[in-house]
Image: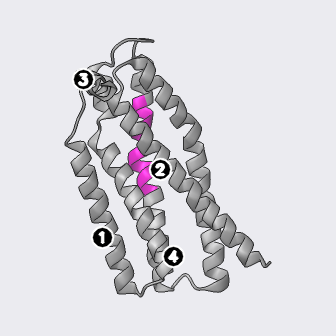
Amino acid sequence: MSIYTIVLFVHIIGAIGYFLSIGSWLFILVGLRRAQRVEEVRALMHVNDLSGPFGDGSGLVLLIAGFYLALSAWSLLTNWILVALISLILILLTNGVLIGPRRRALVKQLKRSAPEGETSLALSQHINDPILWATSQTTAALLLGIVFLMTTKPNLGSALIVMAVALVLGLVSSLLVSRRRYTPQQAADQRVQDNM
């Protein structure tokens, strides 16, 4: 067993952790959209508080191990590595700039809410922020694109096409989801239908 295989394992664990973090955030967003009571929102945001640092740590492990692998066995100028690396850095920066502040604003609004009861209009607006949804879903699609690059190792043109397709799929899927907004009453009606 070489250092390379151990770092490759750590790199894959970082990728799995980052996927879990994004997946749990998407799960939380779906739950938040359906929540009709402040208590439900608070419980889901508590899960977010637990998973957020995990995702940040996983992203850092993914990036550091990826750098080591690229420098020790490949080159940072290898086409697919360059595209994957730039994509991952852009994902991490975009998430920090677009998702982070919106998560904090949602938490701040939640703290201003009553301890229990129906969700307010202001809280619902933070939950249904289209940029929050678009960034989260696009991140998931772009991560799948990066995994495709790592497994197929395409040339530069193909790598760029893969990431462009992943970007378009992420944005289109977020548009489809953002069109469907739940008011607290619609969430309650949906729950009644689900329980029948």
Residue 166 in sight from this viewpoint? yes
Single out the residue that lies furthest toward the right.
Answer: 1
Scheme of colours in the image? one colour
What's the CA distance linking mark 2 and mark 1? 19 Å
Name the residue that disc number 3 marks. Answer: 189
Circle 4: residue type: Met
Residue type, mark 3 in image: Asp
Mark 2 crowd level (few <14, some 14–19, many ≥20, 10 Å Cα): many
Query: Please, what is the dominant secondary structure of the magenta stretch?
Result: helix
Q: Quick one: label 3 or label 2, which is nearer the N terminus?
A: 2
Q: Which residue is mark 1?
A: 165
Examine the image and state in which quarter residue 141 appears.
bottom left
Q: Using residue 175 as the reference point, say whether residue 1 is left or right of it.
A: right
Rendered image: mark on residue 22: 2
In this rendering, is residue 174 above or below 88? above
Q: Which residues are magenta?
A: 93-106
Separation of residues labelled 3 and 4 (CA atoms): 44 Å
How many numbered discs sit on the rendered protein? 4
